Amino acid sequence: MVYLLMRQQVTWHPPKVAAKLSVFARMQRVMYLYSMAYLKFQGEGLFNGREILPANQVLITNEKGIVEDIIADSEAGADVQHVNGILSPGFVNTHCHLELSHMKALLPEKTGLVAFVTGVMQHRNFSQETILEAIAAGEQEMWDNGIVAVGDICNTTHTVAQKSLHRLHYHNFIETSGFIPASANTRFEQAVQTYKAFPAVHSSITPHAPYSVSPALFELINEHSAGKVISVHNQETPDEDALFLDGISSFRQLYSMLGADISFYQPPGCTSIQCWLPKTDKPNQVLLVHNTCTTETDIRFAQQLAAGRQQTLYWTLCPNANLYIENRLPHVDLLVKHQCAITVGTDSLASNWQLSILAELQTLRTHFTEIPLEQLLQWATLNGAQALQLAHTLGSFEKGKQPGVLLLDKRLESVKRLL
Ligand SMILES: [Zn+2]
């Protein structure tokens, strides 16, 4: 009987559904031809979030920029906007510190991470007005550069007012740190207070870096992260791995300078990621940011661990900040070889000359010439949207999404925001 029902379904329903869809699709096409309520874009290529479609394809959106369809130009009717360049969904910047925008050009380049972190901590005397003005200017810069969403690290509530204007989408990573285990509860409670100032659905409490977060604090963050996305600065400098492998590291001088006694600390004898990632099993997504010193063994270790607990890892590249701080780049070729889900970030204006995903892609293209353009663009769009849990509306040209529309120069020399 069940078999008969199944046979009935197979032989009867699909043709009926197909016929209905076909009529609906035909009605849609007629609407595109004659209604003024649609925007139509045709470029020299159409990147849909995954691949570059040929130039004869036209993107159809409604007046609000919500994607309706992608159809051949022969069916698109009049009023098509013809543009020179590649059409792309808006960029997603998965790593930024908007609240540090007032520190642009303050710290010297190529001094190494420990000197950089020390510099950031020493420059704290800015007026609230200066900080807020720089935040507004930083957001405007991202808007102008085609960025539609940001994974933003927050140690303060300085960005709350600007974000409440909803010009860009944000996921707020409320950052906490504290290497002294006894301070874990206090530090975590401070982060919870900051977290409460941001929209809970788009925020999560996140560890700063393995060299600045004690196992006790990692545990508190992990418990708070069930089902959420967190972000960790990972393996940004050789000193980080050294702290975990044998303990001989410039971070000891940093803590000494800060007056923190870390004589209790015993190096566990593994690389940074192999020490901290096993402690982070509750979040369903983890952004690993920088990965400048991550080796092939580390990548295999992380992938195996994540696969075993149904966790998705995103490997966030901020190449211009890496060059600014450490003058080195991550092994992008290894990340590609192991099919890592890569995203792109700008880091902050304290460690970068601009907040531009296009500028990051240009640097990646210069140093890793073999990476296809559409792969780079997917890192900057769909992968970023998925990493920030915003792919229901951003990252690709799929019906119902509102991802923004960019026009990119074919050689990635410029970006213009069309919507
Ligand atoms: Zn950062």
Image (cartoon, rainbow, N blue to C red):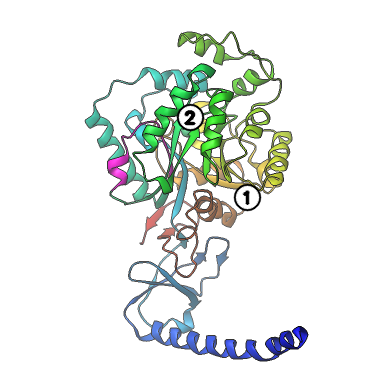
The part of the chain drawn in magenta is 150-164
Q: Is residue 194 visible?
A: yes
Ligand 1 neighbours mark 2 (CB distance < 8 Å) = no
Ligand 1 neighbours mark 1 (CB distance < 8 Å) = no
Q: Is residue 318 visible?
A: no
Q: Hey, what amino acid is under mark 1?
A: Ile
Q: Residue at x 64, y 31 (%)?
A: 273
Q: Hey, what amino acid is under mark 2?
A: Tyr
**SS for dot 2:** helix
Above or below 242: residue 416:
below
Q: Residue at x 51, y 17 (%)?
A: 182
Q: Nearer the viewer, residue 293 or 182?
A: 182
Q: Nearer the viewer, residue 227 or 248?
A: 227
Q: Residue at x 56, y 24 (%)?
A: 216
Q: Nearer the viewer, residue 58 or 189?
A: 189
Q: Position of residue 245 (x, y in %)?
A: 69, 19
Q: How far apart in space, not on screen, are marks 2 and 1 (Cα)?
A: 22 Å
Q: Residue furthest front?
A: 1
Q: Position of residue 337 (x, y in %)?
A: 71, 46
Tally of numbered discs: 2
Q: Quadrant of residue 29?
A: bottom left
Above or below 308: residue 181:
above
Residue that carries the numbered disc 1 in the rendered image: 371
Q: Assign the C terminus to one quadrant of the image.
A: bottom left
Q: Assign the N terminus to one quadrant of the image.
A: bottom right
Q: Residue furthest left?
A: 129
Residue that carries the numbered disc 2 in the rendered image: 324
Q: Position of residue 185 (x, y in %)?
A: 47, 24
Q: Residue at x 40, y 20 (%)?
A: 121
Q: Quadrant of residue 161?
A: top left
Q: Position of residue 109 (x, y in %)?
A: 46, 25
Magenta includes 136?
A: no
